[in-house]
Every structure is written in C-alpha cells, then in structure tokens.
Amino acid sequence: MSKNYKQSSCRICSNTKLHTFLDLGSMPIPNGFLTKAQLSHKEERYPLKACVCTSCWLVQLTHVIPAEIMFKNYVYIPSTSTTMLEHFEKLVKDTLLTSEASNALVVDIGSNDGTLLSYYQKKGMRILGIDPAENLAKKANTQGIPTLARYFTSKLAGEVVVEHGPAKIITATNVIAHIDDLHDAVGGIQVLLHPQGLFVMEAPYLVDLIDNNEFDTIYHEHLSYFAIHPLQKLFEMHDLHIVDIIKQSVHGGTIRVYISHIKSKHAVHPRVENFITEEKIKQFHTLSLYHEFASRVKDMKKELTLLLKRIKKEGKSIVGYGASAKGNVLENYCNITPDILDYIVDATPYKKGKYTPGTHIRIYPEDKILKNSPDYALLTSWNFAGEILKKNKTYREGGGQFIIPVPFLKIV
C-alpha cells in the first residue's frame, strides 16, 4: 500500500478509542475489475479491517480509501437485477404514501443509473439525481433522468435548494455507509430537506450482518456499518430524528430508515425504540459480541476452502456465480483463485471479458453456465440467491449444484 489511510477517530462522535476486531487481510478495491492487459500491472492493495467505537458503538473500517479511487467509474448497476427493480418500485409506492409529496421534488443521493428515480418520474414527480460516477451519470442523463455527476456535500445541497427548492423526499439507498464525512453529508440533508419532508435511507443492518455471518459485506466502499443507536445520535446532532424503521430483505438484511426534521409533524413510530431495545438485548454495545463474530468468520473460511479443495481433488469442476464486490472479498480472503474456480459468470455487461481484482478469474456472461454445465457453482451473490436459483432451473435439473457460503455453508 503506497499511502496510510488509517482512520484516527470515530466519524460520528470523534472518539479516538477504536477497537479493531476483524482483519480480512490486504486486498484490491472490490470493484476494481481488470482488463487482460492490466493483469501484468501491479495492483494496489489496501488493509480491510473492521473496528468499533467504544463510545457510540459505530462499526467502521480502520482504513479509508479516497472516494475518487473507487467511485469515479462505477460498475455496480441495480437495474440488472429483477429483485432490485421490484424493491425500488415498492420503495417509491411506500414513500409516496408516507410523505404526501405529490408533484414535489425528489432527490436521490448516489442515484447510480437513475433506476430508482425513474419510478418517481413515472408518478409525475420532479426528480434530480446526484452521483459522482461519471459513466453512470452520463447514462442516466441520456435516459432522461437529470443527474449531477458530483459528490453530495452540504455546499452542493445549498446550490440545489437555490436552483430547485427544498426536496420533499430525499433518498439514499446503500450510499450513506460509503461516505467518510458523515456530518457534512447529514448537514447537507438538513439543508436540502423540506420542513415537512422525509429523508429515506437504506443500508445493510449491522444486526443482520453479525447474526448471519455476512462478513463479505465488509469491504472498502462500506466505511460504516449501522445499528440504530449510533445512527440516531448522528441525526440528532443535526436537528433531525428517526421517525420510523422498516426491515427489508434485500442484500441479506437491510434497514429502511425514515428521518425528518425534529420540528416536523412526523410522529416517531414505536418501532424505533423497539430496534434500539433489541440491540441492547443482543449486546451490540459489548466487545465480546464482535470478537465472537470474528471467530466465526475464521471458521467459515476454513470450512469453505476445505470443501472447494475436496471437490477439485475429486476431479469435479467449480465456477463462480456473481462477479460482485461480496464475491471479490470472499475470493481474496479465502484465496480462491483460477485453480479453484474455472471462471465466473455475471449479468452485468460492463464486466464481460474482465478479470476479478486480486484473484484474476475471468468473467463471462451468465449463459456460459448452461453451455459448460459445471458440476458446482459457488454463489458469491448469495443476497440474490432466490432470483438466481430460479433463473438457473435448467442448470440445476441437469445436475448442477450451487454452493452457498453465507449465512452458513450449504449445497443446493
């Protein structure tokens, strides 16, 4: 690693006592896919360790990689997944019912290719996307989704208010966890949000991550891992508060959190206190819980690598299914290389013909799995297991089996 990007204090409460509990090793950025020509070049690697603040109990990475390294040209596109399309459509319906924001401004932070905003647009809303990935912002604008290719900051929030007025709805799905300066971002939300508006954020839920052994959700893009208690502290520091929380099934367990101005008319739902109480009961404010999780992760690595080596020793073939960030973490942490996985298939056009970061496994379109009929497919995109298993009914009927590593190792 050429530079030291070590986090010196908690990004919520500034406490300097950060306790490291999980070390996944040193690895490339999770979406740093390579062309064939790049395979001979040196890959930059960065520490991937998780720590917890012993004051507000925010779980976060020990090292922060500059955003411009990871997000300028981004390859994750939710519109390639039927699961995510259905999820976004329902989010829009639920939010409009909750906010009574007919014909008002909707701003999506980290808007990607504009998929979520397109559903608001169909409802007659004024929309604006904000995303630093130039390739995705260009695609969104081409498709009629107004998008700014910029990082969301408090300064930009002020500019948007001057030009467009306050936003009745602000959304951020799997974005806030990517932001290093949380106080600047939340301060911007406070400026941009209409006095009676709602900020709706979604993020992987720390309780599900720990309970379900989702260690591969920990990667360089995800700087923070949220439980409700530290989130509540963060928003209250900016005169905002959490008014409701609804669990979602996507990405292995997600929380949808509704936030409003403290002085708004939105009442706080009892669910908020219920979440905080459950976190206390499960002892998410104790170091022992995190060390137990780290121990299980080590055991999972050993179990998976032994299984894959046994299958290869039997002369059977294994491929990967899903060139995902999760998969790249799993493969690098478990040292899964081309001598284990013959190739990986993925639905994203951008990834076709490229190679996985660190492990250098070739990526092909999904239909290759039917042409070659490998004995096993390691399902690294386990968060879309239902959709993928259904899509590959023919492969399974022909004798193909899926290895699912998370939340526990099983073969289906």
Image: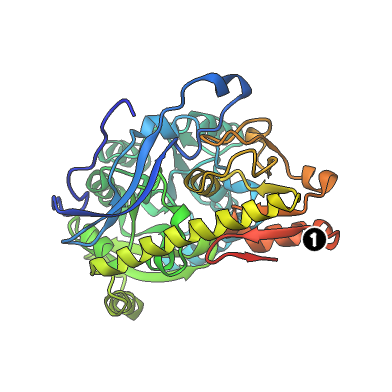
* Amino acid type, residue under disc 1 in the picture: Arg
In the image: residue 338, left or right of residue 103: right
- The crowd level at tag 1 (other Cα within 10 Å; few <14, some 14-19, many 20+) is some
Q: Is residue 239 above or below residue 247?
A: above
Say above or below: 248 vs 108: below
> Is 376 on the left or on the right of 35, as rendered?
right
Picture coordinates of residue 151, whole percent (x, y): 36, 36
Residue 384's place in the image compared with 148, above or below, is below
**Residue 142 in view of the camera:** yes
The answer to which of 325 and 136 lies nearer the viewer is 325
User: x and y percent of residue 140 in the render?
Assistant: 56, 36
Whole-percent x and y of residue 190?
Answer: 26, 52
The local secondary structure at tag 1 comes to helix
The front one of 402 and 85 is: 402
Q: Which residue is mark 1?
A: 396
- Identified at 54% across, 45% down, the residue is 331
Residue 104 visible (yes or no): no
Question: With 135 as the anchor, is 222 left or right in this view?
Answer: left
Q: What residue is drawn where x is 66% and y is 47%?
A: 320
Q: Position of residue 62 (x, y in %)?
A: 27, 46
Q: Residue at x 34, y 29 (%)?
A: 1
